[in-house]
Structures are given as structure tokens and as C-alpha cells.
């Protein structure tokens, strides 16, 4: 079985891992740090905090070692390695390395990191960091694979787009009344409780949530 190591714990990495797993590949997720989102990293975040979780029919479980991770992947389980070091990446012996962290920093990988190295999004340069880059910026080039050059530069404003992101109207701990994947519609703010943050001004599908009780501050 071909083994793919996916670096990252965000929604992009989780979606990548799910798609690869469903394609019949053995997938190992490596989460290097604390994820801020509640379930945007559905497989990674909840799998890390609770040890075991099933997301969209795919079972994910925290792995205690690289050997255990490889064994789990062979059984059709998506293992999650938490805060692995560089030696751990090599110990996985992955056939493909996909860096989906979107760190907006200089990538710390190179083409020799695995037989096939793929970078998702801006910052990766073919030949310098990886063998191929996948475009992640919304538009007609979304999903395009570059075998030379690099993806479009980071705009610096995607998370601030008011058409996609709902920000807290008041300070205090977050209390969400929706779940990932739920369809929401705009709702009028109650005149009796104008400061409530549960009335969604956006319409669409919820793709990311901050963890419950996370502190929020009005911007």
C-alpha cells in the first residue's frame, strides 16, 4: 500500500487526508502543534483530544509511535501523530509527503524528504521545496498542479473576508450553536438581546469553528 504522510491539522489537511484515504491510500496525519479550530481539523483535532473519532465514516485514532501509525494505516484507520519530530517523519517511510500546513513561513521540507513531495498553497517552490505544488487560492486555478514554479502568492486577507468569516461581536468565551457541515441561513438579530452572537448574518455551510470556551475579542 502507498503511504502518504499529511502534515498539518487544519481543514485543508483534513480534507486532503480524507480524499486520499477514500482513494485507497494509507494516510498518516502529523499534527505539529495546537490547533485553534474546534472541528475544522475534524480528524486531527478531535482525534488528538479524545484519542478516537469517526468523521464522515472515516475512523481516526491517535498513534503512540510511528510503527503503530503504519500498522493502523494498513488496517484502514487514519492515525494521528501529535507533535512528531523530523526523525519521526523519516521513520514513517512515507511514499508521499503532503505539506498542508499553510504556515505562511519558509517551508522546512525539500524534494529529498520523500519519493514524492507535494506542497499545498503559497510559499512552496518546485525544485526547492517539493516536486509539485497544488493551487489553493479560490478562483479558476484552484486545484491546479504546478510541476514548475509555484502557486499564486498569499493575498494576506482570505480569513478576513466578511463573506466567509463570522467574527465575535463582543468579548468573551465562545459558545457555538452550530456544527461543522451544518447549513445556516441569515437570521435577524433579536431586539430583546442585540448582543447575542448566535444569529448568523451569513448563509452557507459551516466549514470551521473555534473550540468551545475559546476566548474571543471584538475587532
Image (tube, rainbow, N blue to C red):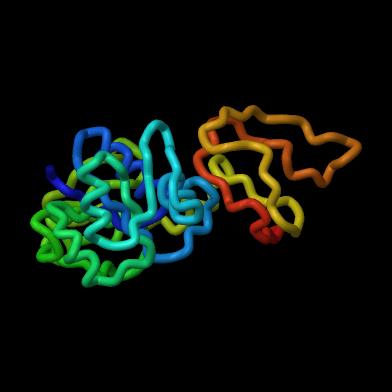
**Residue 197's image quarter?**
top right
Image location of residue 198, percent across then percent down: 73, 40
Q: For the point 16% across and 66% down, which residue is it? A: 110
Extreme right residue here? 192
Q: For the point 75% across and 59% down, which residue is it? A: 171
**Which quadrant of the figure contains the N terminus?**
top left
**Residue 90's image quarter?**
bottom left
On screen, residue 159 versus residue 201, left or right, reads: left
Image location of residue 113, percent across then percent down: 14, 64
On screen, residue 12 versus residue 201, left or right, reads: left
**Which quadrant of the figure contains the C terminus?**
bottom right
Image location of residue 12, percent across then percent down: 37, 47
Q: For the point 30% across and 42% down, which residue is it? A: 77
Does the rendering let one see residue 153? Answer: no
Does the rendering let one see residue 63? Answer: yes
Q: Where 47 sits versus 205, above or below?
A: below
Q: For the point 20% across and 50% down, which residue is it? A: 4
Label count reads 0
Considering depth in this image, is 18 or 183 the residue closer to the camera?
18
Image location of residue 84, percent across then percent down: 32, 67
Amino acid at each position: 500500500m502507498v503511504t502518504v504522510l499529511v502534515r498539518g491539522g487544519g481543514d485543508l489537511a483534513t480534507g486532503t487526508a480524507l480524499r486520499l484515504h477514500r482513494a485507497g491510500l494509507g494516510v498518516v496525519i502529523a499534527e505539529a502543534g495546537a490547533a485553534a479550530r474546534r472541528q475544522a481539523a475534524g480528524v486531527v483535532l478531535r482525534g488528538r483530544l479524545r484519542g478516537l473519532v469517526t468523521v464522515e465514516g472515516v475512523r481516526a485514532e491517535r498513534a503512540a509511535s510511528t510503527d503503530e501509525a503504519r500498522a493502523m494505516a494498513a488496517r484502514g484507520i487514519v492515525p494521528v501523530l501529535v507533535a512528531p519530530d523530523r526523525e519521526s517523519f523519516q521513520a514513517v517511510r512515507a511514499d508521499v509527503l503532503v505539506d498542508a500546513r499553510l504556515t505562511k513561513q519558509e517551508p522546512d521540507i525539500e524534494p529529498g524528504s520523500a519519493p514524492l513531495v507535494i506542497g499545498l498553497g503559497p510559499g512552496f517552490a518546485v525544485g526547492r521545496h517539493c516536486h509539485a505544488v497544488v493551487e489553493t487560492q479560490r478562483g479558476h486555478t484552484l486545484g491546479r498542479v504546478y510541476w514548475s514554479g509555484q502557486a499564486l502568492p498569499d493575498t494576506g486577507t482570505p480569513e478576513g473576508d466578511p463573506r466567509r468569516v463570522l467574527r465575535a461581536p463582543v468579548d468573551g468565551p465562545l459558545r457555538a450553536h452550530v456544527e461543522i457541515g451544518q447549513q445556516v441561513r441569515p437570521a435577524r438579530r433579536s431586539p430583546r438581546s442585540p448582543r447575542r452572537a448566535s444569529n448568523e448574518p451569513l448563509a452557507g455551510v459551516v466549514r470551521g469553528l473555534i473550540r468551545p470556551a475559546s476566548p474571543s475579542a471584538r475587532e
